[in-house]
Image: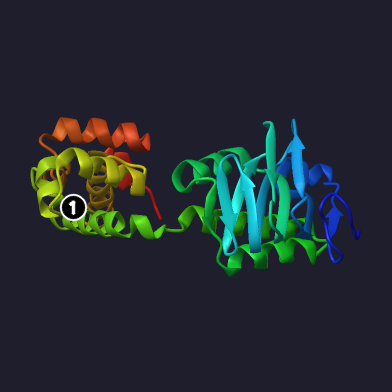
Amino acid sequence: MKLIGNGLERGSYMHFYTPSGTAKRLYYYPLCAGEFFCNNEYEVNREQYNSYLIICVLDGKIKHDGITVKGGEALLVDCYKPHRYYSDTSAHTLWLHFDGGNSHELFEEIIGTKGKKIKCPDFVSRNIFAVMNTDSEAQQSEAIFKMLMRMLDMQNSANEATLSSTETAKEYIKQNYQNNLSVSQIARAVNLSPSYFSRIFKDNTALSPYDYLLSVRLDKAKELLINSDLPVSEIAYRCGFNSTSNFICFFKKETGLSPLKFRKIVF
């Protein structure tokens, strides 16, 4: 559908989509999408439009909630809440309203970790075009999910140093998990204070350093249970647990099985 008015120039268009019952139950699905050429009169001011919105700015500027989004960036808007965005110069945008699946949780995670404005590599525009260029609800869902997951996995340039420290710490833990490691020791290995290190490590992994250490120990214990005949007490010792009983309790809490029952599973 071609559009003009409300600050839209010729060449602007949009598509509406009505999801099937299957899409509503199982998929991520588009509600509408389009390509806009906006002038300085373009503005959207709504109480709600029940969906989540991604605006990929190809050129010019879009403003929202005190944020200026420029060409090469994307704006994320929760349209379940009152919202306003506009251009006071001009803008060329690709955009998508979507919902379904665990859209709310993913959207909140992206905004919480990346912010409402993110860098907009080619994959964003490619996936919006992919949604608009197919009638397959499954393919539309796949394109939306890929886009969200790529956004979630993106690393902002400001995070490069902290990401490097996190990766170094993870490797240090994997090499020393069998020892009596403390957070302070791990932090020293990457030349950071324990409090700052703990914060950036959790920001980048969603786990505290200690929880990550336990996950490494648990994975190694599983490998030894399956690939060796070592007694449980020896495996507990080799994996850095301070007692066999603590190891058994932790193992059962995390897997729902005792180490011996886990050993009997055929993979």
At a point 46% along the width and 58% down the height, the residue shown is 154
Residue 110: x and y in percent read 51, 46
Residue 15: image quadrant is bottom right
Left or right: where 63 falls relative to 191 = right
Q: Position of residue 234 (x, y in %)?
A: 11, 46
Q: Is residue 205 left or right of residue 131?
A: left
Label 1 CA crowd tier, 10 Å (few <14, some 14–19, many 20+): many
Q: Is residue 239 above or below residue 161?
A: above
Say which residue appears at 27% left-offset and 60% top-offset.
Answer: 164
In this picture, residue 164 sits left or right of residue 124: left
Q: Which residue is mark 1?
A: 173
Amino acid type, residue under disc 1 in the picture: Ile
The correct choice, above or below, for 2 with respect to 179 in the image is below
Q: Is residue 79 visible?
A: no
> Residue drawn 58% across and 54% down?
69
Q: Looking at the image, can residue 96 be seen? A: yes
Q: Look at the image and name its color scheme.
A: rainbow
Measured from the top left, where is residue 8 in percent x and y?
82, 56
